[in-house]
Each structure stands twice: as structure tokens, then as C-alpha cells.
Image: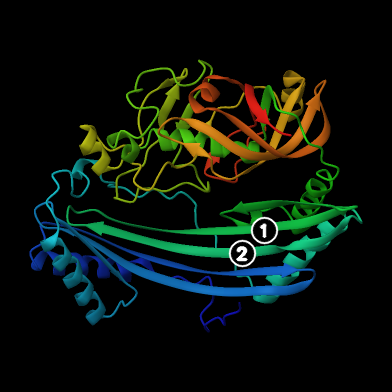
């Protein structure tokens, strides 16, 4: 799939002022049509993605997407509409559509904009915008360099799923009828590589990637490719495990999903629907006493940072778990009203969820575990947030005497999330910072491992 770029650079964004004026006009028109409350936003995303496979360009994609979104309330009756037409007729039609929808929806006493005293009044500069003027030719060269480095690791690497180089920039503008108006630009750049190794009849794949707001913070393509190759080769020669109970060490780059299940369980929509195994756990222990989990939405350059949430509420650093005890839920304004609480500034999710590390690196955690399973990949989504039941396919390495013995796959790890959280023995200091969850490797005291 290949599309041609416009003459405008893929990383060119308009100045926010013009779009802020557009948001003002949308709000004015909706109020004139009778809306009691109005929220409007404009998002523009632009960028380039190149994938190379076996030295040949497989995909070259340029994109420039824009959308104008509008939500209106008529006495707590809600209507929403969106358009990619930024002309006067497109805006007028979108305002009319949202207002028409609101007039026919049911009244919801919890509906409405965020409270005025929660809205951001200052927009801090979080150093999120570092555009990369990346010609397609250069992106292709970098992807080839990355893939070549993976193949050079070992002759057993004889196939590839490709290497991808991508660069995107975004502009977010949001305003509402309570006086909030904010905008910020951001960038996101990434390099990834996935290759396949063969040993006899066995084939294995693995990958590695890096991403950053600033391209200068990316690892070199050759480094990313080499790591992808090394990870693939070490998975060759897999063995099956018999079913057993054993400690499990989840590698840092994979462990974020475990805390994603925790956030899901304390999110407002699951709580007010009474569909969470952590219902009514505020102020109660959920993790061991050494655990500290907090949100850092204002970290400069971080992947999850944002000056305000999807409702315009100011984001702020806050504790979620202190000494193992649940300090607060994850709420937007609607969920907060349903629960008789206040928004936590989490419309759109948590930002830079941080699990404080311990003292040991991965090697130290392996020695602490002594005998057990190192998980480097989860497969599937067998998690029930209502009951806390957890069962997922996995691959990784069997460990004895604190050292990796051989790779394993086609296994399932299972347990109860409540027991898994309380059974965390240690968090590593090998913190993975490329995603929205910043955690080291996680050592669990035991899980059921289902094998052959």
C-alpha cells in the first residue's frame, strides 16, 4: 500500500491560533443554537511510515488526518458530531447535527462538561514537540540498515517480518463554553524490527523497537536490529514444560500489561457498572507494602505526558498506590459523578504510570528467583476484570540456579489478579521507559504454568 505525499512536508503543522479561532466559532454557533454547554476540539496528525522487508520497500505511507469534534449538552442531553470539513458549511452542518442529536437523547443527570474549577488554566511546556524532517529515501535507508543488522547476527536468521521507521507530529486544540482553551503540539518517532530464525524444522520470531518524542533519543537502527536478531536467535531450541507451580519473572518490556489490568480494574466505567474485582477497595491493600505506584503526566518528553486530559482538566502527579494501599481511582467527570466523587484528570486514561523500582537488575532477579519462568512475551487476552481470573499464553525461558537454561513456548500462565498483585516479590531497576507504563521486571512468587 503506497500513497503519495502532498507538496507540504509530512511534518508540517498549522499554527494553533487559527484553529483556536475555529474552536471559538464552533462554540459560539452551538450556544446560539441553544446548547447550554459546548465542548469542541480539533486534532491534526501528520507523518510518514516506511517498512522494508528483505531489503525491499514493502510499504511507504504518508498520512495527514484532521478531524473536528463537537459535543453539546441541552439540559444534560448529549449530542456529538465530527467532520473533516473545516469550511464554514462543514462547521455549520456539524453544529446542526450535534444539536439535533442532543434534542432526541435522554437526559442524564451525570452528563456535562468538567467542573470549571478543575479545568487547566495554564498550559505548561512539556517539551513534547521535536519534528523530524525525514525524507522517504532516508527513512528507507534507515530501515534497511536496521534489518541488515538483524540478519548479520546469525546465519540462522533467514526471513523477516520487516523493519519500520516512522515519524509523526500532532496538534491538539480543545475548548469549551466554561472558558477553557488549550493547545499543544507533540511528536512521536519509532524504529522497529522483527525477524525470523530457523533451526531445522523449527522457526521462531522476535523483535525489538525504540520510540521517542525526539529522534535524537532513539537508539541507532543498527542497535535495534542487532537486539532483534539476538532475541530471535536465543528463542531457537525451545522445549515444552510440564504443568507446574513456579515463580514467574515478567521482563520489563512485557510487565506493563500487568499494571494495565490493575488500572482497568480501578477505572470509573468498570466501578460504577460494578464490573471490577477491585470494587470498594479504596483505602485497602492491593499490593505488598513496598509498592508505590503513581502517575507522572507532566514529565518532560515522556510518551504519556499531556498538560490536560481529554476534557481539559489539568493533569497532575498523584499517588495511586502508597505502601501497597489503594489511594484513588481513575476517573473522568462522568464516572466521578456516577460515584459521587471528583474527576482525577484521567479522561483518556492514565499518563506515565510509574512503578517505583527496587535494587536488583534482571540478572539479580533471576538469582533471587533461582528456579522458575522468565516471561518475555504474552499471547492472547484471557483476563476477566470482573472476577480477576487471569490466563494468558506466554513464551520465555526456563531458569534454574539463577541462570537461563533454555527457551520455552506453547505454555499458559494462570492465576487470580488479586493474588498476583499481592504476590509481587520484587520490582527490578531495569525500568522500561518507552511506553506509557514505566516499570522494571516483575517477580511473582508463584503462578500456575500449564504446559504439556
Q: In the current view of this chain or complex, which residue is farthest to the top?
A: 289
Q: Quadrant of the C terminus?
A: top right
Q: How crowded is mark 1: few (under 14 residues within 10 Å), some or many (20 or more)?
A: many
Q: Residue 202 carries which label?
A: none
Residue tagged by mark 2? 166
Q: Are marks 1 and 2 in contact (CB under 8 Å)?
A: yes
Which x, y percent locates residue 23? Answer: 25, 66
Which quadrant of the structure image shows residue 115?
top left
Which x, y percent locates residue 125? Answer: 43, 50
**Residue drawn at 77 percent across, 37 percent down:** 408
Left-right relation of 200 to 191: right
- The image's colour scheme reads rainbow
Residue 424 higher or lower than 115, as above or below:
above
**Residue 14 in view, yes or no:** no
Q: Tell me the element at label 2.
A: strand
**Residue drawn at 66 percent across, 64 percent down:** 165
Left-right relation of 437 to 35: right
Q: Which of marks 1 and 2 is nearer the N terminus?
A: 2
Residue tagged by mark 1? 191
Which x, y percent locates residue 103? Answer: 11, 62
**Residue 441 in view, yes or no:** yes
**Residue drawn at 28 percent across, 38 percent down:** 343
**Residue drawn at 55 percent across, 58 percent down:** 188
Amino acid at each position: 500500500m503506497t500513497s503519495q505525499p502532498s507538496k507540504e512536508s509530512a511534518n508540517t503543522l498549522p499554527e494553533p491560533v487559527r484553529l483556536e479561532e475555529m474552536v471559538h466559532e464552533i462554540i459560539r454557533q452551538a450556544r446560539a443554537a441553544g446548547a447550554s454547554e459546548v465542548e469542541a476540539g480539533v486534532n491534526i496528525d501528520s507523518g510518514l511510515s516506511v517498512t522494508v522487508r528483505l531489503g525491499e520497500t514493502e510499504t511507504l505511507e504518508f498520512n495527514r488526518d484532521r478531524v473536528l469534534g463537537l459535543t453539546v449538552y441541552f439540559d444534560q442531553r448529549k449530542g456529538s458530531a465530527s467532520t473533516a470539513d473545516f469550511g464554514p458549511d462543514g462547521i455549520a452542518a456539524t453544529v446542526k447535527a450535534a444539536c439535533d442529536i442532543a434534542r432526541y437523547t435522554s437526559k442524564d443527570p451525570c452528563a456535562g462538561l468538567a467542573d470549571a474549577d478543575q479545568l487547566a488554566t495554564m498550559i505548561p511546556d512539556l517539551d513534547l514537540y521535536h519534528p523530524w524532517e525525514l525524507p522517504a529515501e532516508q527513512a528507507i535507508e534507515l530501515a534497511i540498515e536496521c534489518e541488515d543488522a538483524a540478519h548479520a547476527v546469525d546465519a540462522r536468521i533467514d526471513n523477516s517480518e520487516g523493519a519500520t521507521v516512522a515519524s509523526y507530529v500532532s496538534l491538539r486544540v480543545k475548548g469549551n463554553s466554561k472558558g477553557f482553551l488549550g493547545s499543544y503540539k507533540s511528536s512521536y518517532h519509532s524504529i522497529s524490527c522483527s525477524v525470523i530464525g530457523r533451526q531445522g524444522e523449527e522457526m521462531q520470531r522476535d523483535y525489538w523497537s525504540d520510540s521517542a518524542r525526539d529522534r535524537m533519543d532513539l537508539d541507532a537502527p543498527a542497535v535495534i536490529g542487532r537486539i532483534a536478531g539476538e532475541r530471535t536467535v536465543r528463542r531457537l531450541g525451545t522445549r515444552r514444560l510440564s504443568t507446574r507451580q513456579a515463580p514467574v519473572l515478567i521482563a520489563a518490556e512485557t510487565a506493563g500489561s500487568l499494571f494495565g489490568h490493575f488500572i482497568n480494574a480501578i477505572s470509573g466505567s468498570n466501578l460504577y457498572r460494578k464490573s471490577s474485582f477491585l470494587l470498594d477497595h479504596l483505602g485497602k491493600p492491593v499490593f505488598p507494602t513496598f509498592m508505590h505506584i503513581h502517575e507522572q503526566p507532566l514529565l518532560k518528553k515522556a510518551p504519556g505526558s499531556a498538560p490536560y486530559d481529554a476534557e481539559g482538566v489539568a493533569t497532575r502527579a498523584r499517588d495511586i498506590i502508597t505502601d501497597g494501599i489503594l489511594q484513588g481511582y481513575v476517573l473522568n467527570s462522568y464516572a466521578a459523578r456516577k460515584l459521587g466523587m471528583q474527576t482525577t484528570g484521567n479522561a483518556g486514561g492514565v499518563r506515565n504510570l510509574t512503578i517505583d523500582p527496587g535494587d536488583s537488575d534482571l540478572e539479580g532477579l533471576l538469582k533471587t528467583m533461582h528456579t522458575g519462568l522468565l516471561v518475555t512475551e504474552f499471547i492472547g487476552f484471557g483476563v476477566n476484570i470482573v472476577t480477576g481470573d487471569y490466563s494468558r499464553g506466554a513464551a520465555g525461558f526456563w531458569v534454574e540456579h539463577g541462570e537461563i537454561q533454555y527457551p520455552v513456548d506453547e505454555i499458559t500462565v494462570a492465576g487470580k489478579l488479586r493474588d498476583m498483585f499481592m504476590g509481587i516479590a520484587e520490582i527490578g531497576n531495569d525500568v522500561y521507559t518507552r511506553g506509557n507504563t514505566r516499570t522494571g521486571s516483575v517477580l511473582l512468587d508463584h503462578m500456575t504454568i500449564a504446559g504439556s
